[in-house]
Image (cartoon, rainbow, N blue to C red):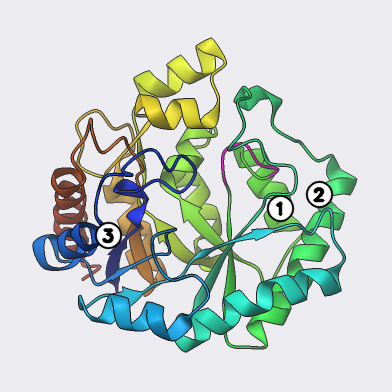
Amino acid sequence: MIKFGTNPIAWANDDDQTLGADIPTERILEEASHLIGFDGIENGHRWPQDDPQALKELLSGYGLSFVSGWHSMNVLAHSIEDEKKAIQPHLDKLKHNGCTVCICCETSNTIQGKQMALSERPVLDAAGMKDFGARVEEIAQYCANQGIDLVYHHHMGTVVQSPEDIDAFMGFTGPATKLLFDAGHCYFGGGDPVAVLEKYVSRVGHFHAKNVRPAVRQKVEREGLSFMDGVRAGVFTVPGDQEGGVDFTPLLQILKASGYDGWIIIEAEQDPDVRNPLLYQTLGLHTLKRIARETGLI
């Protein structure tokens, strides 16, 4: 059954923690659950990080499920055995909270948090991507053996950013490796979200309903801005925003046709002082539920 969730990054940013620093944790949870009506929420730096039971109690107190959380992979820099040891506490937290997916992204050489133009991001050649894919697949199988699907997050500023990167990565992984399809990162990275989702929907294990403002994206590219400069400038937004460039109707139609039954998450980081999270997240959820009803997804 489809469930709708959010990410606290809309209220309190993880990469730039000055964004939303003044917003109380209780307000985030109250708005996400009781005022907006999400079923669950992903990880954020405000939640208990090393106590799975405390995390469960915090979120359940607001009627929210813990959906999953980001894990930074370093398979290009570390041994497979070290990576297994590094991911195990995260898997234990996910299992304790009833999660079924582990969100992963290679960060050993990412520039997503650095003051660098996105054009300077790391790129793997075919041999490098083949080796990388084999390494990720081994970690994915390790996760699958514990009942958790590794869902790989293609992401701006990383080795899997463009549609060509996604093609290469998906070609060198599988079947244990699943895809976290992020509509916003796909569009920002130069891809057609509909075409990419159609191609890989059978391996999609998680869905991020992120939207992009084309005018801000163009500014980022034209001026050689960093990823976080783009975030602060408002490159991302929610489904239903008239400024957004992503059409979510065909995307949810594809999910319906494929029999997708996982989470749909609004992960749309913006400056909360400029764009009120309560208003934008409400718009996003209502838009997605309307489209889901129209397409028969729910």
- The percent coordinates of residue 272 (x first, y second) are 26, 38
Residues in magenta?
Answer: 155-159
- The percent coordinates of residue 281 (x first, y second) are 21, 50
Quarter where residue 176 is shown:
bottom right
Residue shown at 36%/69% (left/top)? 263
Residue corresponding to mark 1: 169
Location of the C terminus (image quadrant): bottom left
Spatial CA span between label 2 and label 1:
6 Å
Quarter where residue 275 is shown:
top left
Spatial CA span between label 2 and label 3:
40 Å
Residue corresponding to mark 2: 129
Give the main secondary structure of the magenta stretch. Answer: loop
Residue type at numbered disc 2: Met
2 or 1: tag closer to the N-terminus: 2
From the viewer's side, name the closer residue of 23 and 126.
23
Residue type at numbered disc 1: Phe
* Mark 2 or 3, closer to the camera: 3
Spatial CA span between label 1 and label 3:
37 Å
Asked which secondary structure carries label 2, the reply is helix
Residue corresponding to mark 3: 25
1 or 3: tag closer to the N-terminus: 3
